[in-house]
């Protein structure tokens, strides 16, 4: 593995008087795409929030690009499942993307060119003046992704970003995201309930289990996906390695 961009060491998290995440080590290399799966409530979102500095661990350390993470920063950008709530309905597409630049203190004169560039990247430039309610769910999700890209984050966190979309839109966005990640060298932590999505997108898949104990820690498995890129919706999903990984990871989603 190359240089570790994200380094979590012995990170343990308690919430509501309960251990959600038992001590966990994770290193994510620059440019790597790591998917996180596990049954509902096992702490996937909590792991992301800890990596981004939104939750302070009770034990262990988190470092991003060699610096300790001690609170939220613009280095980590979040894409949420609920695009309807993530976007401001009274702002246009360009206005929503602009939010990231305003928050970062980018001068007003510089903003239009940067907004146009990220909208081009996600194929939304012709829709810059529209409002979220005028767009499909997939397009709204692309606005959220564009806003994150405008932030130029070190680490992109995605929490079930395609969970609310129909199957066709989801596949299109998976391929678009994979292309963006490759072209821009992004580093991604991606939570999903969908095992196939995790294998299709990930360089590695991290499986968490619920109710960790000393014998059965939160980190159930961390598995490489040795399938070449670019991947293809039909061929990759029929690849023997894909099917083997699907079988191997199946029981981590609470099917055992
Ligand atoms: N602020 C909080 N206070 C107390 N308990 C919390 C808090 N936030 C989360 N939890 C609990 O921690 C556990 C893990 O939550 P988390 O959202 O990380 O799980 P998840 O794996 O992302 O779940 P899902 O797949 O359902 O989204 C859950 O049982 C949740 O109820």
Image: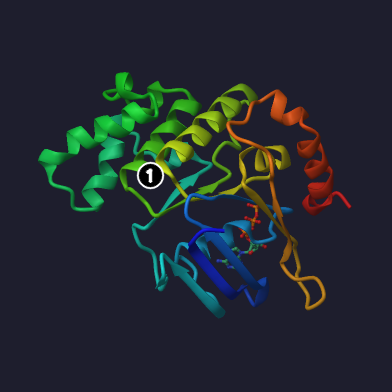
* Quarter holding ligand 1: bottom right
Question: Residue visible at 50% across and 30% down?
Answer: 176
Q: Mark 1 points at which residue?
A: 148
Q: Is residue 121 visible?
A: yes
- The percent coordinates of residue 154 (x first, y second) are 39, 55
Image quarter where the N terminus lies is bottom right
Mark 1: few/some/many CA within 10 Å (<14, 14-19, 20+): many
Q: Is residue 90 visible?
A: no
- Report helix, strand or loop for mark 1: helix
Give the camera-side residue of 184 and 69.
Answer: 184
- The percent coordinates of residue 73 (x first, y second) are 35, 62
Give the camera-side residue of 211 and 247.
Answer: 247
Residue 213 location, quadrant: bottom right
Question: Residue visible at 61% across and 39% down?
Answer: 201
Question: Residue visible at 46% across and 70% down?
Answer: 63
Horizontal arrangement in the rendering, residue 182 relative to residue 43 (left or right): left
Horizontal arrangement in the rendering, residue 56 relative to residue 153 (left or right): right
Q: In this view, does 96 lie above or below 131?
A: below
Residue 229 location, quadrant: top right
Q: In this view, does 245 lie above or below 212?
A: above
Horizontal arrangement in the rendering, residue 96 relative to residue 224 (left or right): left
| Most distant residue in the bottom direction | 59
Question: Residue visible at 35% across and 34% down?
Answer: 89
Q: Is residue 208 above or below residue 16?
A: above
| Most distant residue in the right direction | 256
- The percent coordinates of residue 193 (x first, y second) are 68, 45
- The percent coordinates of residue 34 (x first, y second) are 59, 51
């Amino acid at each position: 593995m190359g240089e570790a961009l994200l380094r979590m060491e012995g990170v343990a998290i308690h919430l509501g008087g309960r251990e959600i995440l038992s001590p966990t080590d994770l290193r994510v290399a620059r440019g790597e795409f790591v998917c996180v799966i596990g049954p509902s409530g096992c702490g996937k979102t909590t792991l992301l929030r800890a990596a981004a500095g939104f939750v302070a661990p009770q034990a262990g350390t988190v470092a991003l690009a060699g610096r300790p993470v001690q609170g939220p920063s613009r280095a980590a950008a979040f894409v949420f499942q609920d695009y309807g709530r993530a976007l401001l309905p009274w702002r246009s597409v360009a206005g929503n993307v602009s939010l990231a630049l305003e928050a970062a203190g980018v001068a007003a004169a510089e903003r239009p060119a940067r907004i146009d560039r990220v909208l081009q990247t996600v194929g939304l430039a012709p829709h810059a003046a529209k409002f979220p309610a005028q767009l499909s769910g997939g397009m709204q999700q692309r606005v959220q992704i564009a806003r994150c890209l405008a932030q130029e984050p070190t680490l992109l966190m995605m929490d079930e970003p395609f969970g609310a979309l129909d199957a066709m839109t989801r596949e299109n966005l998976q391929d678009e995201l994979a292309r963006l990640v490759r072209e821009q060298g992004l580093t991604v932590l991606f939570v999903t309930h969908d095992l196939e999505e995790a294998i299709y997108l990930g360089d590695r898949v991290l499986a968490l289990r619920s109710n960790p104990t000393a014998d059965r820690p939160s980190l159930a498995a961390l598995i490489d996906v040795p399938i070449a890129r670019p991947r293809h919706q039909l061929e990759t999903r029929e690849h023997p390695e894909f099917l083997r990984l699907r079988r191997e990871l199946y029981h981590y989603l609470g099917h055992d």
